[in-house]
Image: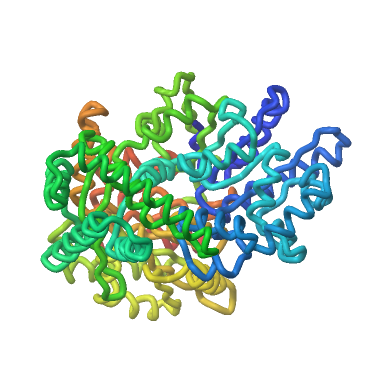
């Protein structure tokens, strides 16, 4: 594991170090990232190596491919119009191909049959590292299926760049490896921004059902003449969720899985759990009958019944384990309330350890992760392989970084009041006054964000002749990207800069870079603990058992400080960047040892006095 600040060349180091091993041992490199934009960056670095090898007349064949999910690569208008989740897309895509209803796939098969290898469909493009965007453009021009062309190419590629789910989601991994035609032991695995893997590994191992999915199940069961008991089962679940939604106060409520099972099977008239298990297996088998009948009729098959059966098979498999948590979850978005019943995995190692054991070797990269915590949560030292953790020295010049912890500010519980928010705004005013171009303010939560806005933040931004940009939770990816580009453009003259207001853990505080003047100062407003929900409490309790009473540190403190570390690193992305990082909550004082090493060395405590920030920050930017 290598922990080194962003901008220090972790990607080029990893590729340059691992490629000789890959060629010597005849291995493939699977380079996993969190986002598509990160995948594109890897391709750019690979192309630099490709050009270097070409310039030096080496005979080494270096090719690579970044791939995306079906929904991001598909050109079939029927599938795209349905807006499905990945599992449903797989089922519908399969049906469209079976019924010869996808012209892009049919064209691809015809062309593929004419060449010895898929690379020869476009040798100039595929004999070097190629990004998914370039592959999609080629396929649009040729009216081919980008998704399956990428899969057909996998076998020929030395390096495959993909999102974590391709390897860590069990049902995606199986198909992925089949196309590559290799076992895991023939792979070198790279996990970039590896701190994100902790949540990914539990997310892919969790399941949920909602009234919407149940309504679609019931519709299929009625249409395909299922046994009445199966329809009754759906109606029982829908009524339970409906009643819970009406009388539910709060966002989350724990469910005792054994008691819940007993309630369900008794409502269905079963004597014991064995009868219920057999019933769920029958439901699963019936889903195949529905699927076959839909195919025979030439219909598009979305497997709602099968997904429901899998949910209950998982419940029956895990309900006695303390590594899972069961709950009702109520969310509100744009004034609408939605409820779901969830199986929440608590232990990432259930997914990660089998993969770590089987791959040839694994390199974990991060700019902010704590190697001690990451090692335990992912199970590196339980993989059967030796483990080495490296924390690199900071390459950034001391004179280019100002890092403050502000005294006199605390956003804990009762402190979230107008007086505290006004005080924070006064200190933000000092930061904006001293900062020449753009600033970011990433709040611990949307409540704190709203508290700052309702207590005068907009006026303070306007007073400093800057423009305010909001990160709203309902924005689509394209809308958000457009907003961020507008924010960045305000850093150039004749503009006087702008302020990007968002939350720690949001897409703009973790997945976006702001080099140069795109973000000169960043304020971490509040200590970004998650709300102590029942699932967080369950995770703390479970981690206390399995990690020697480290539950609070691993499940509550570490995720919070990780969000703060990620947000604080946004302005410093290159060796030449200059930035000021302001931790605006006195609780960081007692937790400073968890802050990223490269920031921690520069930390300065700022007293709770008027102009104390200005006196330190103005000379930094105006010397």
Foreground of the two, 206 or 614? 206
Foreground of the two, 599 or 205? 205
**Residue 491 x, y percent position in the rendering:** 54, 70
**Residue 74 x, y percent position in the rendering:** 60, 61
**Residue 351 x, y percent position in the rendering:** 40, 35
**Residue 149 x, y percent position in the rendering:** 69, 51
Residue 435: quadrant of the picture: bottom left
Report the residue at 49% width, 29% height from top.
390
277 left or right of 131 in image = left
Foreground of the two, 524 or 120? 120
What coloring was used for the rendering? rainbow
Foreground of the two, 558 or 7? 558
* Residue 509 sits above or below residue 13 on the image: below
219 left or right of 74 in image = left
Report the residue at 72% width, 27% height from top.
23
Report the residue at 64% width, 38% height from top.
180
* Residue 60 sits above or below residue 498 on the image: above
Residue 407 showing in the rendered view:
no
**In the current view of this chain or complex, which residue is farthest to the right?**
57
* Residue 600 sits above or below residue 231 on the image: above
Report the residue at 23% width, 68% height from top.
421
Residue 494 showing in the rendered view:
yes
267 left or right of 348 in image = left
Residue 13: quadrant of the picture: top right
């Amino acid at each position: 594991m290598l922990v080194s600040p962003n901008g220090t060349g972790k990607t080029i180091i990893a590729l340059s170090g691992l490629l000789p091993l890959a060629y010597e041992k005849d291995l493939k490199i699977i380079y996993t990232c969190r986002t598509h934009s990160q995948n594109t960056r890897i391709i750019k670095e690979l192309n630099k190596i490709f050009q270097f090898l070409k310039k030096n007349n080496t005979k080494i064949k270096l090719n690579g491919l970044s791939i995306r999910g079906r929904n991001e690569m598909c050109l079939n208008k029927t599938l795209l119009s349905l807006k499905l989740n990945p599992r449903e897309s797989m089922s519908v895509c399969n049906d469209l191909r079976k019924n010869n209803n996808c012209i892009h796939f049919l064209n691809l098969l015809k062309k593929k049959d004419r060449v010895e290898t898929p690379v020869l469909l476009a040798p100039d493009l595929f004999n070097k590292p190629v990004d998914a965007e370039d592959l999609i453009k080629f396929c649009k021009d040729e009216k081919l299926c980008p998704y399956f062309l990428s899969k057909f190419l996998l076998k020929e590629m030395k390096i495959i760049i993909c999102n974590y789910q391709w390897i860590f989601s069990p049902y995606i991994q199986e198909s992925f490896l089949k196309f590559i035609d290799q076992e895991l032991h023939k792979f070198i695995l790279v996990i970039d921004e590896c701190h994100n893997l902790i949540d990914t590994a539990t997310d892919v191992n969790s399941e949920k059902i909602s009234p919407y999915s149940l309504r679609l199940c019931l519709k299929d069961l009625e249409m395909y003449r299922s046994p009445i008991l199966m329809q009754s089962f759906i109606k029982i679940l829908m009524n339970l969720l409906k009643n819970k939604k009406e009388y539910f106060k709060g966002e989350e409520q724990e469910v005792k899985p054994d008691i819940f099972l007993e309630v369900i099977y008794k409502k269905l008239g079963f004597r014991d759990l064995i009868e219920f298990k057999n019933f769920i297996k029958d439901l699963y088998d019936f889903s195949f009958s529905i699927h076959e009948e839909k195919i025979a009729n030439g219909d598009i098959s979305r497997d709602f019944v099968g997904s429901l059966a899998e949910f209950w098979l998982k419940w029956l498999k895990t309900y006695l384990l303390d590594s899972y948590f069961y709950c009702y979850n109520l969310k509100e978005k744009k004034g609408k309330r939605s409820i779901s019943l969830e199986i929440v995995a608590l232990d990432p190692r259930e997914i990660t350890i089998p993969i770590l054991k089987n791959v040839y070797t694994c390199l974990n990269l991060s700019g902010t992760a704590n190697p001690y915590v990451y090692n335990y949560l992912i199970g590196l030292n339980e993989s059967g392989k030796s483990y080495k953790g490296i924390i690199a020295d900071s390459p950034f010049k001391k004179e280019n970084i100002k890092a403050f912890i502000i005294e006199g500010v605390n956003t804990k519980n009762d402190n979230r009041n107008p007086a505290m928010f006004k005080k924070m705004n006064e200190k933000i005013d000092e930061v904006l006054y001293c900062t020449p171009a753009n600033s970011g303010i990433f709040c611990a939560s949307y409540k704190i964000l709203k508290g700052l806005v309702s207590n005068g933040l907009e006026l303070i931004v306007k007073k400093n002749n800057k423009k305010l940009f909001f990160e709203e939770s309902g924005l689509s990816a394209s809308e958000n990207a457009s907003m961020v580009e507008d924010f960045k453009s305000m850093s150039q003259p004749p503009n006087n800069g702008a302020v990007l207001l968002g939350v720690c853990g949001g897409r703009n505080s973790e997945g976006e870079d702001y080099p140069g003047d795109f973000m000169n100062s960043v304020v971490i407003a509040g200590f970004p603990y998650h709300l102590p929900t029942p699932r967080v409490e369950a995770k703390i309790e479970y981690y206390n058992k399995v990690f020697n009473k480290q539950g609070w540190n691993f499940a509550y403190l570490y995720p919070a400080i990780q969000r703060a570390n990620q947000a604080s690193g946004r302005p410093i992305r290159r060796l030449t960047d200059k930035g000021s990082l302001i931790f605006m909550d006195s609780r960081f004082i007692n937790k400073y040892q968890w802050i990223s090493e490269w920031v921690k060395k520069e930390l300065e405590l700022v007293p709770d006095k008027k102009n104390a920030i200005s006196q330190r920050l103005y000379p930094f930017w105006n010397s």
